[in-house]
Amino acid sequence: MSLTALRARLLPRPRARQAEAPRTPERRTPERRPPRRLLALLLRGLAVAVAFVAMVAFAVVLARLTLQPSPASESLTHSNVRPGDSLRAYVDQPSLRYAVKQIGGNLLLGVPFGVLVPVLAPRTRGFLRVLLLTATVMLLVELAQGAMVTGRAFDIDDVILNTTGALIGYLLLGRRMSRAVHSRT
């Protein structure tokens, strides 16, 4: 159920006004707007809090997957700064399962970023902004992985796949969620 539909179900419907004598300032009854705004504010705050918790969980998963040492793979790792080299290597593997795991895993790793960032920071909403922010963050993660973690290497194809996954997440869900949470009421 979307946030808009949830608001419509929870908020009271305005009553039709009956013809009555004009009200003087002394007889004016309080309007229902403040509670409605308060409920919208609470729902927005709840959505942002859930997105924040999900982003922290995403950061923990990202760190565990990318920044965990792998001394056994140290001799097998090599940096890749040429776009497409790793992708060709994945596709040329005899096992399709390995290629799907590598390519699909890197795509899926970026999806939460594209969904959650626009909800947490509405100024990052927009295809180009999500692209630049995601590419920067994933580039920093890959640089840290290649420079500081044993058995891991920098791979530009991982940055490209993670960024593509974030853009997919943004286009499928992030943009709509951000608009629902940060709509002007």
Image (spheres, grey):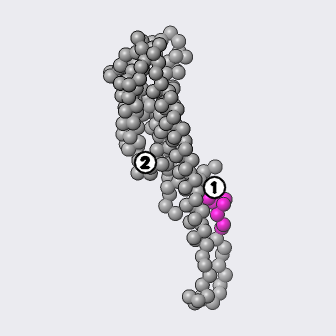
- The x and y percentages for residue 64 are 50, 29
Judge whether residue 12 is colored magenta. Answer: yes
Which residue is at the front of the view, 151 or 98? 151
CA gap between label 1 and label 2 equals 23 Å
Give how far across and how far down residue 76 sits, in percent.
Answer: 42, 12
Q: Is residue 88 left or right of residue 112?
A: left
Does 37 sit above or below residue 162? below
Q: Quadrant of residue 67?
A: top left
In the rendering, at what x and y percent does residue 104 appear?
51, 25
Whether residue 73 can be seen here: yes
Whether tag 1 and tag 2 are in contact, CB under 8 A, the answer is: no
Let me know if residue 104 is in the magenta part. Answer: no
Q: Nearer the viewer, residue 124 or 141?
A: 141
> What residue do we see at 49% from left, 36% from top?
59
Residue 168 makes an appearance in the image: no
Residue 97 is labelled as: none
Residue marked by disc 2: 125
Q: In the image, what residue occupies the spot 35% across and 19% down?
A: 79
Which of disc 2 and disc 1 is earlier in sequence? 1
Residue at image location 53% in from the left, 12% down from the top: 95
Q: Residues within 10 Å of mark 1 (few under 14, many from 20)?
A: few
**For residue 175, above or below residue 8:** above
Q: Quadrant of residue 37?
A: bottom right
Instruction: Write down the residue under mark 1.
Output: 6
Residue 97, quarter of picture: top right
The range drawn in magenta is: 7-13
For disc 2, the neighbor class at 10 Å (few under 14, some 14 to 19, many from 20) is some
